[in-house]
Image (cartoon, rainbow, N blue to C red):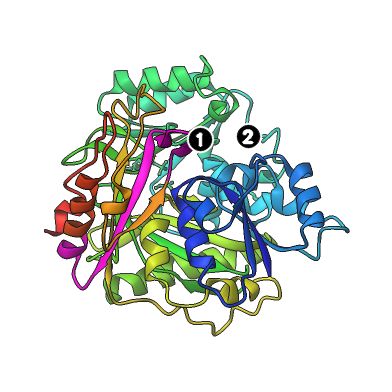
C-alpha cells in the first residue's frame, strides 16, 4: 500500500517510523516531511493545506491511504475534500471538518461536553457577534444551554470581575497553542479579554472567548483511535509544555513527554473510559459526526476525578514520539479497520516499557530564535530514536530550522533509565544555542 502522510514535524517522523514497520506498507510519501522522514520514505514538497496538489499527487502515485498529522488541514476540511468521487477510494485518516471542530472551536467542544455530560471546567462564552459561527456552520447543530452564552462585551467584563482567581480565558479558534491565558488577577484577565475580543489579538480565532474556572490538578493525555463507532486506546502520555525547569516560564509546543503516565492507573483509566471516552464516542454518533482518526483528550486529574481540559483532533507532539514506540500493533492494520467501522474488538497491543522524550530546542525559543545552525553528533547517539522536528538538510549538513529541533526518545524497563538515556544522547548532539529541559518526568523521580 502506498501511503501519504501529511505534516513535517517530530510527530510525523514518529508516525512514519511506525508505518515503515508494517508489512502492509509499500511506500511512504511525506508532505512536506523533514530530513528524518527522508530516511524512511520520500518527502514531497506540497504544503499541508494545498488539497488540490495533494489530490493530483495521490492520483498519480496510486495512494491508498492518507494520514493527516496536524490540525490545520483537518480544521480546514481535508477529510471532506477527499470524499469527492475521484478520491473516495482513498482511505483518509482524520475527522470530518465537523468533527475537527472539537479542536477548532473551544466553544463547540464545551457545548459538546455539556450536552454529553462529560466532566469539564464550568464556563461561559462571550462574543461580539453572538453565537453564530460564521465559518464552520456546524455549531448550530448543537443546541447549547443558553445560560452559557452572551453577546455582550460588558457582561463579559462583569463576569470576570465577579469570578474567582485564577481565571482561564481561551480564544475560541486555533491560535497556534497561544490562545489560552491563565490570569492571576482580574486586571490581567480583563486585559486579555479586551485583547482577544476587541483588539483582535488572535484575529478571527478570538472573536469568541470561553472563560472557565481554573482546575487544580495534574494533567495527562489520553489518545483514542476511533472509527466513530468503536474505539481503542493508545498509550497514555504526559507532555511538559513550559520552557523552564520546574514547569516555569512561557508555554511551548512541548519540551518532552513520558509514557505511560504513572498516576493513570487502572482505576483512574476506568473512570476516564466511562466518564469521558465512551460518552465522547457516543456523542459523535448522536451528533452524526463522521470521525475516523485520532482523538487526543487533554485531561486533568482533580481529587482522583478526570476532567477534560481540551480535545484535539490529531495526535500530540511530542506525545506521539513516546506513544508510537510503545505501540506494538501494526498501525496500518489498525488504520485500515477505520474505513468500514471494523475497529470493534481490535486490541492495541502496547509495550510494557517506559518511553521518555527530551526535546532539543533552539536558544530563545519560544520567543525569537536563530535558524540554520549546523547540527552534529547524530552518529554518536546510541539506544535512542531521534525524531526530527525542526531540521533542514543543506550542503553543510543538517541544520536547525525551527524552535523545536529534535525529539530524543528512549525506551527502558523504568522511566528513570529511559530519561537517563535520552539526556545522555541530548548531550551528544551539538549545535549553537542548544537548550533542553533536564527535568522531564520530574514529578515521578
Ligand atoms: P489548552 O490549549 O486548552 O490545552 O490549554 C493550554 C494549557 O492551559 C493546558 O494544558 C493547561 O495546562 C492549561 N489549562 C487550560 N484550561 C485550564 C483549566 N480550566 N484549568 C487549569 N489549567 C488549564
Ligand atoms: N503537545 C501538545 C499538543 O500537541 O497539542
Q: Provide residue 414's location: percent of width, then percent of height.
A: 18, 69
Task: Please say if 221 is above or below 20.
Answer: above
- Quarter of the image for the C terminus: give it: bottom left
| Residue 241 appears in view | no
Q: CA distance from mark 1 to mark 2?
A: 9 Å
Mark 2 lies on a secondary structure that is loop
The image quarter containing residue 274 is: bottom left
Q: Provide residue 347's location: percent of width, then percent of height.
A: 48, 82
Q: Nearer the viewer, residue 52 or 122?
A: 52
Task: Please say if 410 is above or below 10.
Answer: below
Badge 1 vs badge 2, beta-carbon distance below 8 Å? yes
Mark 1 lies on a secondary structure that is strand
Mark 2, residues whose alpha carbon is within 10 Å: few (<14), some, or many (≥20)? some
Q: Which residues are magenta?
A: 389-418
Q: Nearer the viewer, residue 256 or 188?
A: 256
Task: Please say if 132 is above or below 96.
Answer: above
Q: Is 151 within the magenta?
A: no
Residue at image point 26% right, 72% down: 265
What label sits on residue 378 in the rendered view?
none
Q: Quadrant of ligand 1?
A: top left
What label sits on residue 125 in the rendered view?
1
What label sits on residue 131 in the rendered view?
2
Q: Nearer the viewer, residue 75 or 257?
A: 257
Amino acid at each position: 500500500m502506498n501511503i501519504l502522510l501529511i505534516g513535517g514535524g517530530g510527530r510525523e517522523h514518529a508516525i512514519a517510523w511506525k508505518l515503515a514497520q508494517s508489512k502492509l506498507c509499500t511506500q511512504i510519501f511525506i508532505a512536506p516531511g523533514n530530513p528524518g522522514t527522508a530516511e524512511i520514505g520520500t518527502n514531497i514538497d506540497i504544503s499541508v493545506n494545498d488539497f488540490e496538489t495533494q489530490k493530483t499527487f495521490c492520483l498519480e502515485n496510486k495512494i491508498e491511504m492518507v494520514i493527516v498529522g496536524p490540525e490545520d488541514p483537518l480544521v480546514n476540511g481535508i477529510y471532506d475534500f477527499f470524499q469527492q468521487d475521484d478520491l473516495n477510494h482513498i482511505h483518509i485518516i482524520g475527522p470530518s471538518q465537523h468533527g475537527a471542530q472539537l479542536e477548532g472551536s473551544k466553544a463547540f467542544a464545551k457545548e459538546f461536553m455539556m450536552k454529553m455530560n462529560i466532566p469539564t471546567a464550568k464556563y461561559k462564552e462571550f462574543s461580539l457577534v453572538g453565537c453564530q459561527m460564521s465559518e464552520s456552520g456546524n455549531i448550530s447543530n448543537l443546541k447549547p444551554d443558553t445560560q452559557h452564552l452572551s453577546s455582550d462585551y460588558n457582561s463579559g467584563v462583569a463576569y470576570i470581575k465577579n469570578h474567582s482567581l485564577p481565571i482561564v480565558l481561551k480564544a475560541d479558534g486555533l491560535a497556534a497553542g497561544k490562545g489560552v491565558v491563565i490570569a492571576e488577577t482580574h486586571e490581567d484577565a480583563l486585559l486579555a479579554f479586551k485583547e482577544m475580543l476587541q483588539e483582535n489579538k488572535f484575529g478571527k480565532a478570538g472573536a469568541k472567548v470561553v472563560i472557565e474556572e481554573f482546575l487544580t490538578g495534574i494533567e495527562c493525555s489520553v489518545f483514542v483511535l476511533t472509527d466513530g463507532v468503536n474505539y481503542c486506546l493508545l498509550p497514555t502520555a504526559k507532555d511538559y509544555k513550559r520552557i523552564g525547569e520546574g514547569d516555569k516560564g512561557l508555554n511551548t509546543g512541548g519540551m518532552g513527554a513520558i509514557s505511560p503516565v504513572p498516576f493513570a492507573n487502572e482505576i483512574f483509566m476506568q473512570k476516564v473510559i466511562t466518564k469521558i471516552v465512551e460518552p465522547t464516542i457516543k456523542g459523535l454518533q448522536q451528533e452524526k459526526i463522521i470521525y475516523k482518526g485520532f482523538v487526543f483528550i487533554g485531561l486533568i486529574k482533580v481529587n482522583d476525578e478526570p476532567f477534560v481540559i481540551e480535545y484535539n483532533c490529531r495526535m500530540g507532539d511530542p506525545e506521539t514520539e513516546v506513544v508510537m514506540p510503545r505501540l506494538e500493533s501494526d498501525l496500518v492494520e489498525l488504520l485500515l479497520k477505520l474505513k468500514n467501522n471494523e475497529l470493534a474488538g481490535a486490541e492495541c497491543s502496547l509495550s510494557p516499557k517506559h518511553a521518555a522524550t527530551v526535546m532539543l530546542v533552539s536558544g530563545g525559543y519560544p520567543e525569537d530564535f536563530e535558524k540554520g545552525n549546523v547540527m552534529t553528533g547524530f552518529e554518536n547517539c546510541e539506544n535512542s530514536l531521534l525524531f526530527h522536528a525542526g531540521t533542514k538538510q543543506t550542503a553543510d549538513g543538517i541544520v536547525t530550522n525551527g524552535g523545536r529541533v529534535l525529539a530524543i526518545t528512549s525506551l527502558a524497563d523504568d522511566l528513570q533509565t529511559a530519561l537517563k538515556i535520552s539526556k545522555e544522547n541530548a548531550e551528544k548532539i551539538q549545535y549553537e544555542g542548544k537548550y533542553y529541559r533536564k527535568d522531564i518526568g520530574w514529578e515521578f523521580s
